[in-house]
Image (spheres, rainbow, N blue to C red):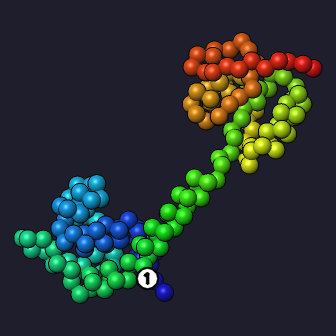
């Protein structure tokens, strides 16, 4: 069972510790982590406080892992490796998983007229997310990237939008 002070342990602190341990130097570790030295030093001190151990002996030429530091490093390496594999798998999943089509549908028309379009789109896309609003609000959401496309009623301000008029047949 873990103690309460470890329940809030941030895995980023463990990653920072591992990089510092590999480099035995705060400057090089900070460069690898793309942060400056003072925050990295604070991260290591915070981790030491949370764990209740001294991880490094500090001297003028760098850092040396303490026995406790070596033990912590050995314990966290499988966790960090698992994190890397998990993030890689999640990234791969996101690449191969089609995003939902975010479609806006205007409320300017009777909603039933779009039923056939919605059904056809649902057959060809894994996920369809439909938002119903007034045409100007939908145009604004398309501009902001919140919608992929919208079926709107004209006229409206179409600046910055690509329009494809659709024939209207009742």
Residue 80 in the image: above or below residue 40: below
Point out residue 81 in the picture as x, y percentages from the top left corner. 43, 73
Identify the residue shown where x is 72% and y is 12%: 155
The image quadrant of residue 58 is bottom left
Say if 44 sits above or below 116 in the image: below
Along the line of sight, which residue is nearer the eye, 132 or 79? 79
Task: Give the residue at mark 1.
Answer: 3
Element class at badge 1 = loop
Q: Residues within 10 Å of mark 1 (few under 14, many from 20)?
A: few
Residue 45 appearing in the image: no
**Count of numbered circles on the image:** 1
Q: Is residue 85 left or right of residue 94?
A: left
Image quadrant containing the C terminus? top right
Q: Residue furthest left?
A: 60
Residue 133 lies left or right of residue 81; in this view the side is right
**Residue 19 drawn at (x, y percent):** 28, 68
Q: Is 128 left or right of 28, judged from the image as shown? A: right
Q: Position of residue 137 (x, y in %)?
A: 67, 25
Judging depth in this view, the residue of 47 and 99 nearest the camera is 99
Hey, which quadrant is residue 41 in on the image? bottom left
Q: Residue at x 17, y 78 (%)?
A: 64
Indicate the position of residue 20 as horizontal and vertical percent values. Answer: 25, 69
The answer to which image quadrant residue 84 occupies is bottom left
Residue located at (18% from left, 61% from top) = 27
Can see residue 52? yes
Tell which of 29 and 49 is nearer to you: 29
What's the residue at 74%, 18% (across, down)?
A: 165
Closer to us: 133 or 5: 133
Q: Is residue 96 above or below residue 86?
A: above
- 2 over 46 or under it: above or below: below
User: Which residue is situated farthest in the top direction here?
Assistant: 155
């Amino acid at each position: 069972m873990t103690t309460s002070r470890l329940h809030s342990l941030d895995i980023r602190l463990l990653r920072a510790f591992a990089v510092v341990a590999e480099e035995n130097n705060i400057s090089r570790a900070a460069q690898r982590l793309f942060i400056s030295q003072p925050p990295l030093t604070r991260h290591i001190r915070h981790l030491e406080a949370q764990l209740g151990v001294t991880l490094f002996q500090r001297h003028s030429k760098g850092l040396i892992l303490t026995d406790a530091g070596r033990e912590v490093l050995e314990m966290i390496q499988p966790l960090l490796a698992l994190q890397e594999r998990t993030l890689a798998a999640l990234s791969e999943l996101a690449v191969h998983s089609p995003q939902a089509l975010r479609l806006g549908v205007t409320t300017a028309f009777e909603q039933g007229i779009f039923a056939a379009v919605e059904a056809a789109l649902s057959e060809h896309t894994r996920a369809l997310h439909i938002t119903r609003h007034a045409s100007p609000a939908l145009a604004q959401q398309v501009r902001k990237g919140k919608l992929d496309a919208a079926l709107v009623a004209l006229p409206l301000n179409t600046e910055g939008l690509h329009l494809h008029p659709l024939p209207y047949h009742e």
